[in-house]
Amino acid sequence: MKDGESTPAEAEDIVNRVRRALTHAPSGSDPTAAKPSVATVGARQSADFGALPEYELLKIQKAAGEIAGIENPFYRLHDGRAAATTSMEGREVVNFSSYDYLGLNGNPAIGAAAKAAIDRYGTSVSASRLTAGERQVHRDLEAALAQLHGVEDAVTFVSGHATNVSVIGGLLGADDLIVTDALIHNSVVEGAKLSGAKRILCPHGDIEAIERALRLNRRRHRRALIIVEGLYSMDGDMPELAALVRLKRRYDAWLMVDEAHSLGVLGDNGRGVAEEQGVDPADVDIWMGTLSKTLASTGGYIAGSRKLVELLKYTSPGIVYSVGTAPPVAAAALAAIELLQREPNRTAKLRQNGRDFVFGAKVRGLDTGLSIGASVVPIIVGSSPTTVVLSHRLLARGYNVVPIIFPGVAENQSRLRFFITSRHTADQMAGVLDAIAEELPEIRKAPSFVNVVSGR
């Protein structure tokens, strides 16, 4: 036996531990056993983070992959710019795992704008904007974002995730109510936790459940906030925005829409879900978005009324206590907005590609779930091990598609998540769909480690 290989007994133990992990049961758990006291747990704590149960789960997952002969599908190294294609270890592959929806990353005009900003302002503003970090490029970008959304003003943050955490955590408190869709972004979940408000997660896309949550709880709370995504990042579907506007008015609530995956994607001009569904953007109290997807940059923003933006600029920790957005980052996003508005054909091409991809998947008998065929299209596989093996085999065939597995989604909803761009070709999309249609049945029927772990 070679060094590092597992014995049959060790392999069987790993399989059992993976099974328990996939069913939410901790390794070695016994539901009838007494739980350790707080004092006992505290006495065992050490500086060895490798002893934590969370790290144990990572080891289990790694060992399972090694037994199946599968490389870690996460943190794969790319050699340069990732677009519709990318280079990994010197090999060019078709790339379906990057957010570059309109193919703007690396655009010469955007690069030139970033370089010009470096020449004028440097690579950092070296302070919070409240103190000494304000630059004209910030104001120009925020004016463009407000105009794009059709509202009065906007403000940018250095991180999209931190935008939701800081804004939600700051606007709401223990006396308040937050009602969200169950599939909302993690950043919203973390912001809601930080706020201390009562949190209600409603089944995905269930307007009646949101209405019921408000009807039963609104009167007992000072403020109420409804939060949805403009295009859901895992399923690729939209909320019923007009119905949500009616609910927020009926129950005196704020409505917040996370447009991270829908800006540049939805609507004839890429202005997002309001344009797509014909809703007045002023009817939404808080628009949130990111600069890292369509806008080929990094960071986040809030758009809305002038009073909302002024309040955030002076009270939101993510602005007051954080360095301002780096000048080349802000300039790149501003240039991307200008290209988005000047070249709406990019959005049109993206939507056509999305529709073609969903149609092609369904023709081949693949499950695309609720996706409307925009920038996000899942191929639902149904088990984490099978999904990881499928991703591995696709990479071998020249397609980079990262698996989404438990706990990111429910175990029976494990999937390959495709980010479709305007730059993908018909041959690239047909090729990866053909590969999935060929590989998936073989993986499912093979008497392999994958099926042993899955209990098949």
Image (tube, rainbow, N blue to C red):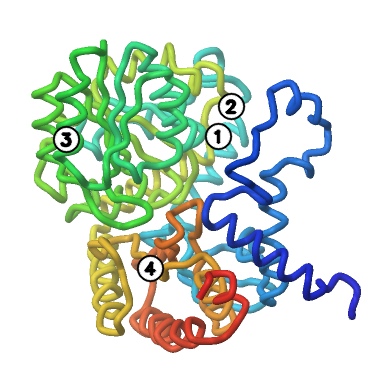
Which residue is tagged 2?
125
In the rendered image, which residue does mark 3 sit on?
Answer: 281
Along the line of sight, the residue nearer the viewer: 327 or 207: 207
Is residue 26 placed above or below 442 in the rendered structure? above
Mark 1 residue element: loop
Label 2 sits on what residue type?
Answer: Val
Q: Which residue lies under the disc numbered 1?
A: 326
Q: Which circle's residue, 4 or 1, is located before the other in the chain?
A: 1
What residue is shown at x 51% (from left), y 65% (from top)?
384
Left or right of 201: which side holds 121?
Answer: right
Q: Nearer the viewer, mark 4 or mark 2?
A: 4
Q: Nearer the viewer, mark 3 or mark 1?
A: 3
Badge 3 amino acid: Pro
Quadrant for residue 224, please give it.
top left
- Where, by quadrant of the figure, is residue 255 drawn? top left
Mark 4, residue position: 380
Q: Secondary structure at mark 3?
A: helix
Label 3–label 4 contact, CB within 8 A: no
Q: Secondary structure at mark 4?
A: strand
Q: Residues within 10 Å of mark 3 (few under 14, many from 20)?
A: some
Labels in figure, total: 4
* Rendered position, 325 above or below 96: above
Q: Which of the two residues, 405 or 326, is positioned nearer the viewer here?
A: 405
Is residue 144 at all visible to an observer of this figure? no
Residue 142 % position (x, y)? 35, 31
**Residue 125, placed above or below residue 405:** above
Task: Name which residue lies at 17% across and 55% down.
Answer: 268
| Amino acid found under the numbered disc labelled 1 | Ala
Task: Specify few, some or many for label 1: CA neighbours under 10 Å numbering under 14, 14-19, or 20 or more.
Answer: many
Precedes in sequence: disc 2 or disc 1: 2
Image marks 2 and 1: residues in contact by CB distance under 8 Å: yes
